[in-house]
Amino acid sequence: MRIDVILPTFNRELLLERALDSLFAAERPDGLDVQVIVVDNASTDGTRALVLAQMNRFGGRLHYLFEPTPGKPHALNAGIAATQGDLIGLIDDDEEIAPDWFRVIWRQFAAEPDLDFIGGKCLPRWGAQRPDWLGNHYLGVIGWVDPGPQRQLMDGSYQGMLMGGNAVVRRRTLEAVGSYSSELSRTGTRLLGCEDEDMYHRVLEHGARGVYVPELVIFHYVPEERLSKKYFRSWCFWRGVSQGVMDRHRPDSVPYFLGVPRYQVGRAARGVTHIVGRAVRLSHRTPADAFADELACWDLAGFFWGKHAYRRRVRQRPSTSPEPVARRRIA
């Protein structure tokens, strides 16, 4: 069994080095061939030199690929096209894998040949003190994902999704569902995203079988600049825009109001009610709950704009069929 770990990166030389250190130090089971492909998404720092300098240490298991088109989906598509492993592992450049990450992967796929994908926990590695307004709401803004200690089937009833920062997917599944959508890629200061969510829905529509594995753990670095209300507001708004764009092509099976899922409208309406109640001293909320009320409104505003008004210069419908990506040689 072979796994190709794809690690897209852009101008994060220091964090990338920590990610590579964790990949090198992790235990590798005898039955699993591990290859690591760093996809440099047009970095201007020392990323290329760092990867080339690490190659001898990895003994031929570390490879470098340059992808000039900006955007994580482009980097992912290029990386997938350049590899040949039975399994595709996906992590980000600001993460570190747990020491037993590869062993957990090998154990799961060796025991279940019909398993198509697995996901796991993304736990924070704090770069600054956690603020008091950050409760248990909107933890996805900082990549904190912890569905609990129990193994769960990832299907239509699963309360989360397959996060691209800690996922392993069989190559046959990715080849069947097609490439990552570049319509949902971040551009400049616009925090578009949801390419992972789009891919997760397409994988489920294909009939793939996946599970959440609590032992599959990565640690995600949370820098101080992301622990600000400004960043949370921007992230929630643009996440809403991304979901609105997706909803044009894949509407949810729930009641809608003015083109927006009714539950989302209700959540924002309750938030506004709490905000008004605090203003007239009729409501008492913790700082975390109060900020969550505000973020629900940013979510709704973003979704409405993404659904009805947002347009990109390059308009690409999220892929629903295999889209070829030119293969390039990796170093």
Image: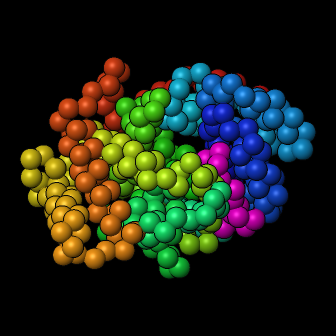
Does residue 202 appear in the picture of this structure? no
Closest to the observer: 279 or 17? 279
Provide the residue span drawn in magenta. Answer: 86-105
**Residue extending farthest bottom:** 150
Residue ID at (61%, 72%): 215
- Left/right placement of residue 316 relative to residue 67 reads left
Residue 304 in picture, x, y percent from top left: 20, 43
Q: Quadrant of residue 84?
A: top right
Residue ID at (36%, 55%): 204
Residue 222 in picture, x, y percent from top left: 60, 55
Residue 211 versus residue 162 in the image, above or below: below
Question: For the C terminus, which image quadrant?
Answer: top right
Q: Quadrant of residue 316?
A: top left
Verify whether residue 104 appears in magenta. yes
Residue 210 versus residue 310 in the image, above or below: below
Does residue 131 appear in the picture of this structure? yes
Verify whether residue 180 appears in magenta. no
**Residue extending farthest front:** 280
